[in-house]
Image (spheres, rainbow, N blue to C red):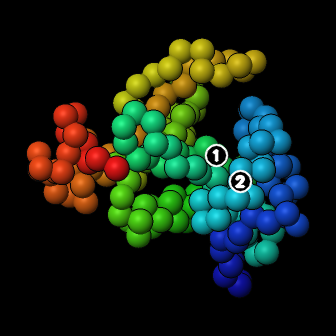
Amino acid sequence: MTRAHIELGNVTPHNIKQLKKLNSVVFPVSYNDKFYKDVLEAGELAKLAYYNDIVVGAVCCRIDTSEKSRRLYIMTLGCLYPYRRLGIGTMMVQHVLNYVERDGDFDSIFLHVQVNNEGAIDFYKQFGFEVVETKEHYYKRIEPADAHVLQKTLRKKGESNGTKISNDDSGKDGFRKH
């Protein structure tokens, strides 16, 4: 038996339709044209997952700078059902973790998961994510409409690359001035 070849590849104008089709099959919500336009400009933050040269999964992220912190938001991370439990999701999460580690300036990684998606919740917990909030009526047109916010904290507020910011170079709220 030959071993499966799993790899991540870039999202390009030539394969964006494969991403759209994959997302329509994997997720209960649909994404608009702006989502896909942004994904094309996301670089390393958007990857297709290939299993023996067939697109079977994808991860799409964006940088979020709200709430006075720099966080990575996983917009989508999914894999076709027959290809789950083969290490593809783990490879995509590891890509995200490697990205934030190389960058070195993220406070956390977060995502939304439908409250009844126990498989996804358990999957992310393996990587140190925890449920930090539940948003009621987060989703439109799907049931249940509530979503858990899962987060992996990389550093606490007021820390910069693992060290606390001194009062000398911070604003009155304890965050570095830009």
Q: Secondary structure at mark 1?
A: strand
Query: Picture coordinates of residue 39 (x, y %)?
Result: 71, 53
Q: Quadrant of residue 151?
A: top left
Residue 26 makes an appearance in the image: no
Residue receiving disc 2: 39
The residue under the point 36% across, 58% down is 105
The residue under the point 80% across, 37% down is 32
- The numbered mark at residue 76 is 1
Position of 30 with respect to 66 (left or right) is right
Position of 113 with respect to 109 (left or right) is right
Q: Nearer the viewer, residue 145 or 32?
A: 32
The residue under the point 41% across, 47% down is 70
* Amino acid type assigned to the residue bearing label 1 in the image: Thr
- The numbered mark at residue 109 is none
The residue under the point 16% across, 57% down is 163
Decide: is 115 above or below 73: above
Query: Picture coordinates of residue 81 (x, y %)?
Result: 72, 49
For label 2, the crowd category at 10 Å Cα-Cα, with few meaning under 14, some 14 to 19 and many 20 or more, is many
For label 1, the crowd category at 10 Å Cα-Cα, with few meaning under 14, some 14 to 19 and many 20 or more, is some
In contact (CB < 8 Å): disc 2 and disc 1: no
Q: Say whether disc 2 or disc 1 marks the residue closer to the N-terminus.
A: 2
For the N terminus, give its image quadrant.
bottom right
Residue 66 makes an appearance in the image: yes
Outermost bottom residue: 2
* Amino acid type assigned to the residue bearing label 2 in the image: Val
Query: Picture coordinates of residue 14 (x, y %)?
Result: 88, 66
Q: Secondary structure at mark 2?
A: helix
Looking at the rendered image, the disc whose residue lies closer to the viewer, 2 or 1, is: 2
Q: Quadrant of residue 89?
A: bottom right
Q: CA distance from mark 2 to mark 1?
A: 11 Å
